[in-house]
Image (spheres, rainbow, N blue to C red):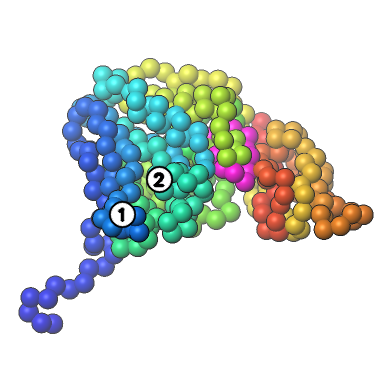
């Protein structure tokens, strides 16, 4: 190697291009940005400016609160922009890091994935500091924000293509002590439903990255359809404060209410469309179903006189999720049946 020539760094050794305008170690309330340089046609030296708030007082646990991991899911941003505005430092013992819109380009566009690179942030972890815009955001969370956190609350809902019962959730984990702590936080969130969740595609997820670090991780699915309601926004706001109280960061006891525990024990919970067409719901969210019950029909729309395809439940439970738009394509998730825990 020639003298004076520095060896190339691996992605894990390279510094993130994202710079925070807040000091994560300073006490007080700080509102700022995660600034990611992004050169584009309309701004040669432009940046993606991701809003962030840090509220810190003394020593204590750290909560990382995130929304709009997918840009068309709104309960999280509603709750977190509101919390960033209203949370005062005297209420906090420890630290709260609030990022209301993780995938800010997608949030601005109202789309699930980024309009810049079509990146799905929740399938982009651990990311790359020299990758696409979405990969750079994932890398910053992976290497900078997640290591700071003790507990992570990441809001989701169904976006424009799914609708869910409003639930908080955690995953079954190999580390049973970590799993217990995650489900204790789910219980504290106190959503109308609480889910023991499996993923059909866990590779590259924020959830997986946080859990691999041993963090307490709670997620949600709070309805959907590409909008929010007064009810689901209130569930998100109350649940956020409940989790902070449960963690001992905000004083007081969580505001508890009745929750119904559900489980997704296997891939049999999911039904995927094998036909294009018009969806006819046969049961509504929360309705009980038995194995073999018809839960949806898909009508062909190319001509009249053809019988619809019928889709049946593979197990007993309740309808926990459904395809949202009226038209469905082959391969779309059509319905999810969750079992009910006694």
Residue 275 visible from this viewpoint: yes
Q: Residue at x 43, y 59 (%)?
A: 117
Compared with 235, 38 (above or below) is: below
Tell me the distance, in whole angstroms, between the alpha carbons under discs 1 and 2: 17 Å
* Residue 107 quadrant: top left
Q: Residue at x 76, y 58 (%)?
A: 275
Taking the view exactly as shown, the residue that stands out farthest to the left is 3
Q: Is residue 225 left or right of 135 when viewed as pictured?
A: right
Q: Which mark is residue 263?
A: none
Q: Is residue 19 left or right of 223 when viewed as pictured?
A: left
Q: Which residue corresponds to mark 1?
A: 43
Q: Quadrant of the N terminus?
A: bottom left
Q: Which residues are magenta?
A: 157-169
Q: Earlier in the sequence, mark 1 or mark 2?
A: 1
Q: Is residue 41 left or right of 287 when viewed as pictured?
A: left
Q: Quadrant of the C terminus?
A: top right
Q: Residue at x 51, y 48 (%)?
A: 111
Residue 66 visible from this viewpoint: no
Name the foreground residue: 124 vs 57. Answer: 124
Counting from the top left corner in percent of width and height, residue 78 is at 46, 31
Q: Is residue 156 left or right of 81 when viewed as pictured?
A: right
Counting from the top left corner in percent of width and height, residue 143 is at 29, 52
Q: Which residue corresponds to mark 2?
A: 104
Q: Residue at x 57, y 24 (%)?
A: 231
Counting from the top left corner in percent of width and height, residue 206 is at 43, 49
Compared with 74, 241 (above or below) is: above
Compared with 199, 232 (above or below) is: above
SS under mark 1: loop
Name the foreground residue: 248 vs 326. Answer: 326
């Amino acid at each position: 190697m020639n003298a004076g020539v520095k060896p190339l760094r691996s992605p894990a050794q390279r510094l993130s291009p994202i710079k925070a305008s807040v000091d994560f170690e300073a006490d007080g309330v700080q509102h700022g940005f995660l600034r990611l340089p992004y050169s584009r046609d309309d701004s040669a030296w432009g940046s993606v400016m991701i809003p962030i708030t840090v509220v810190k007082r003394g020593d204590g646990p750290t909560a990382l609160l995130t929304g709009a991991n997918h840009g068309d899911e709104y309960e999280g941003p509603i709750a977190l922009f509101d919390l960033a505005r209203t949370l005062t430092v005297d209420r906090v013992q420890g630290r709260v890091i609030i990022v209301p819109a993780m995938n800010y380009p997608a949030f601005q566009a109202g789309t699930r994935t980024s309009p810049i690179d079509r990146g799905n942030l929740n399938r982009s972890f651990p990311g790359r500091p020299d990758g696409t815009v979405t990969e750079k955001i994932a890398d910053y969370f992976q290497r900078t924000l997640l290591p700071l956190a003790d507990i992570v609350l990441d809001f989701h809902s169904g976006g424009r293509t799914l609708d869910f019962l409003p639930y908080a959730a955690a995953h079954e984990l190999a580390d049973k002590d970590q799993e217990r702590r995650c489900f204790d936080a789910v219980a504290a969130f106190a959503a109308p439903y609480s889910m023991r969740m499996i993923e059909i595609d866990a590779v590259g997820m924020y959830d997986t990255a946080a859990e691999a670090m041993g963090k307490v991780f709670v997620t949600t699915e709070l309805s959907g359809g590409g909008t929010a309601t007064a009810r689901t926004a209130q569930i998100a706001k109350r649940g956020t404060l409940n989790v902070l109280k449960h963690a001992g960061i905000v004083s007081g006891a969580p505001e508890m209410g009745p929750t119904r525990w559900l489980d997704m024990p296997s891939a049999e919970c999911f039904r995927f469309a094998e036909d294009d067409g018009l969806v006819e719901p046969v049961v509504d969210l929360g309705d009980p179903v038995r194995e073999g019950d018809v839960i949806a029909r898909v009508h062909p729309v190319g001509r009249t006189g053809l019988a619809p395809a019928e889709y049946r439940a593979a197990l007993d439970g309740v309808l926990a999720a459904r395809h949202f738009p009226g038209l469905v394509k082959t391969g779309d998730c059509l319905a999810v049946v969750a079992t009910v825990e006694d």
